[in-house]
Image (cartoon, rainbow, N blue to C red):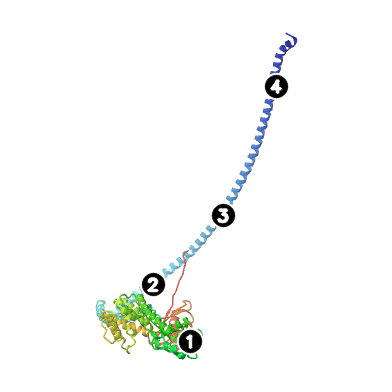
Amino acid sequence: MDIKTTLLILALPIIGTFGYFLKAYIGKIKLTSAETRSQKIVEEAVRDAEAKRKELLIEAKDQMLRERNLFEKEMRDRRQELQNIEKKFSQKEESIDKREEQTKRKEKILQLREQENQEREEELRREFERHRKELERISNLTSKEAKKLLLSSLENEIKFDAQKLINKIEEETKITAERKAREIVLSAIQRSASDFTSESTITTVTLPSDDMKGRIIGREGRNIRTLENLTGVDMIIDDTPEVVVISGFDPVRREIAKLSLERLIQDGRIHPAIIEEVVKKITGEIEKNMLEEGEKAAFELGIPGLSRDALFALGKLKYRTSYGQNVLSHSREVANLAGIMASEMDLDVQIAKRAGLLHDIGKGLDAEGEGAHAIVGAEMARKFGENKQIENIIASHHNDREAESFEAILIQVADTISASRPGARRESINTYVKRLENLESIAASFKGVEKCFAIQAGREIRVMVENQLVNDEKAEVMARDIAKKIESELKYPGIVKVTLIRETRIIDYAR
C-alpha cells in the first residue's frame, strides 16, 4: 500500500466526521433562517389583523353613529306626531266640553220650560174645572146630560158635514176625471213631436245661367209647351234672373215638373223627345217614391198587413196639403196621438194607430169633393181589405157617419189636436218659432229667472228661478207679472200656462 492510499484511508473518517458536522451546521443555519422567516410572517399577520380590527372597529362605530342618528330622527318625528295628536285631542276635548256646556244649558232651558208648561197646564185644568162648575150652575145640567146633548148636536152636524164631504168628493171626482183626460191628451201631444211642413202652390228652380232660359223655351216655345203639356203645370220665365217659377195646384205635378226640369238642365239636351223621355222616367220614380213613403210610414208606426194599394195611397199624401199642413205628416201625427191615448185608456192601440194613419186617405184622390174625403176614404179602405171597424172610424172622423167605437172618438180627438195645435195650420213656421222665442224672452227678462222653456207648442212657459233671489212670496208675484206681461205683449190662440219652479238644493260631501 503506498502512502497516498494510506493517507486516503486515514483521512476518510476525518472527512466523514467533518461532513457530518458541516451538514449539521448547515441544517442549523437553515432552521434558524426558517424560524426567522416564520416569525416575520407571524408578525406581519398580527399587524394585518390589528389593522383589519381597527378598520372594522371604525366601520362599526360609523354604522352605530348612523343608526343612532336615524333612531333619533324617528324619535323626533314620533314625538312631533304625538304632539300633533295630543293637540287634536285637546281641541276635541275643548269642543266636547263646549258642546256639553251648551247641552247642559239647553237641558236647563228645557227643564224650565217644562216646569212652566206644567204650571200652565195645572192652571188651565183649574180654570177648566171652574168653568165647568159655572156652566153646570148656569144651565142646570150635569156633565152627563151636557155630554148627551152635545153628542146629539154633534151627530146632526156630522151628518151634514158628511153629506157636504160626499158632494165635495163627487165634484172633485168630476174635476179629476176632466184633468186626467187633459193629462192624457197633453202627454200624447208632448210625446208626438212631429215635424211641420208648409207648402204653397208654386215651386222655383234655380238655373245655372240666364242663357239656359232660351234653351228651356226652345224654338217658338216648343220645349216649354211640351214640358207644360206633359206635366200639367204653368212655367213662368220672367225677368227674375236665373229662376224658373213652376205654378200648379197639384203638388205631384209640380214635383214631377221640377225634377224633370232639373234633370234636363243637368243633362244639357233639351228637345221634345228628350223631355218626354225624362218626364216619363221622373213620373215612374215619383210613383216608386210614393210606395216607399207609404211603407216607411207603416214601418215607423209598427202597422203590418197594409196592402200595396193602401201603401201607395198613403205615399201619395206626401204631396198633398190641407190648409198648408202636409197630409202624410198629419196622418202620422194622428196615428201617434191616437196610439198613445189608446194605450193610456186601455183601448186597442193597433186599431187606433191603423185608423189614424188611414183616416185622411181619401184626400189623395184628384176628384175628391169638398168635405167628402171621409166617406171616400172609408170606401177606399174597404177596397183595400180593411175591416168594418176601420171603415167606420175613417167615415166618422168628421161626423159624416155615427161613431161606433171608442177608437173612433179617439181619432176625432187626435185629428182635432193635430190640426188645431199652434204651428200646424195657417201659421208659418217662422211666425210660430218667433212667438215661442218672444214667450221665452218675456219670462227671461225678469230678475232672478235662471232658465225658461216654452213647451206644449207654446201653451205653457216653464220658468226656473234662483232660490237665493226669489222666495215663495216673490215667486207668486213673479208668476202673475209674467202672465200679465204675456197678455199685454203677445197675441196667441187659447191660453198660456205660466209654471214657476223654485227649488232648494242642498249639497254636501262625504269624505
Q: Please identify, in this view, whether the residue under mark 3 or under mark 4 is nearer the observer.
A: 4
Secondary structure beneath disc 1?
helix
Residue 439 placed where, x, y %? 45, 84
Residue on which the image places disc 4: 25
Q: Nearer the viewer, residue 46 or 15?
A: 15
Residue 331 placed where, x, y %? 35, 81
Residue on which the image places disc 2: 117
The type of residue carrying mark 1 is Arg
Q: Please identify, in this view, whether the residue under mark 4 or under mark 2 is nearer the observer.
A: 4
Query: What separation in Å lies between label 2 and label 1 (alpha carbons)?
Result: 106 Å
Q: Earlier in the sequence, mark 3 or mark 2?
A: 3
Disc 4 vs disc 2: Cβ atoms closer than 8 Å?
A: no
Query: What separation in Å lies between label 3 and label 2 (alpha carbons)?
Result: 59 Å
Q: Please identify, in this view, whether the residue under mark 3 or under mark 1 is nearer the observer.
A: 1
Query: What separation in Å lies between label 4 and label 2 (alpha carbons)?
Result: 133 Å
Q: Earlier in the sequence, mark 3 or mark 1?
A: 3
In the picture, measured across the screen, residue 70 lies left or right of residue 153, that is: right
Outermost residue to the right: 3
Secondary structure beneath disc 3?
helix
Q: Dividing the picture into quarters, in which one does residue 335 lie?
A: bottom left
Q: Residue at x 51, y 62 (%)?
A: 94
Secondary structure beneath disc 2?
helix
Disc 3 vs disc 4: Cβ atoms closer than 8 Å?
A: no
Residue on which the image places disc 3: 77
Q: Dividing the picture into quarters, in which one does residue 30 lie?
A: top right
Q: Please identify, in this view, whether the residue under mark 3 or under mark 2 is nearer the observer.
A: 3
Q: Earlier in the sequence, mark 2 or mark 1?
A: 2
Residue on which the image places disc 1: 215
Q: Earlier in the sequence, mark 1 or mark 4?
A: 4
